[in-house]
Image: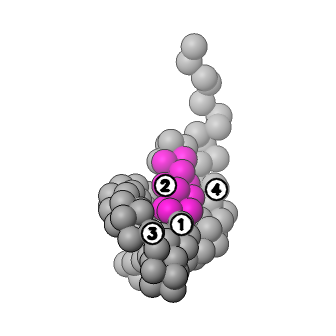
Amino acid sequence: MKRSVLTRYRAMAYITAVMLLVLCTCMIFKYGFGMGKDLTLVVSQVHGVLYIIYLVFAFDLGSKAKWPFGKLLWVLVAGTIPTAAFFVERQVVREVEPLLAGDAAEPVKV
């Protein structure tokens, strides 16, 4: 497996998690204080698109790492639970790093 597969997943995991926290904050302002209705709409749509990209990258990583269905499902759902993607990403990196050990031995082409 190439390191770029893990890097893409990690980037999207962080971006999706941050956008979900921003969305939660917008929802609090929208429903709690009655303000930010338009911003909430934009943030929710952006998070939706980014979550779809996250799903593609997470599925790609899971298929290359040969994860069982339950694990893959947990990683996919982590993008919908606030802060879960941060913790799941760390766990995934620890499990996938040994699979990339052979990648480090290849010479870098310039």
Q: Residue at x 60, y 74 (%)?
A: 83
Percent of width and height locating residue 24: 51, 75
Residue 21 coordinates in the image, percent (x, y): 55, 70
Which of the marked residues, 4 or 3, is nearer the chain's N terminus? 3
Question: What's the magenta region?
Answer: 6-20
Among numbered discs 4 and 2, the one appearing first in the sequence: 2
Q: Which residue is mark 3?
A: 36
Label 4 Cα neighbours within 10 Å, binned few <14 / some 14-19 / many ≥20? few
Q: Residues within 10 Å of mark 2 (few under 14, many from 20)?
A: many
Real-space Cα separation, disc 1 to disc 3, in angstroms:
12 Å
Tag 1's secondary structure?
Answer: helix
Q: Residue at x 53, y 66 (%)?
A: 22
Q: What residue is disc 4 on?
A: 98
Q: Which residue is mark 2?
A: 12
Q: Please tell me whether residue 46 is drawn above or below residue 106 in the rendered image.
A: below
- Distance from disc 4 to disc 2, alpha carbons, whole Å, reads 21 Å
Mark 1 or 3: the one toward you:
3
In the rendering, at what x and y percent does residue 66 appear?
Answer: 42, 65
Front position among marks 4 and 1: 1
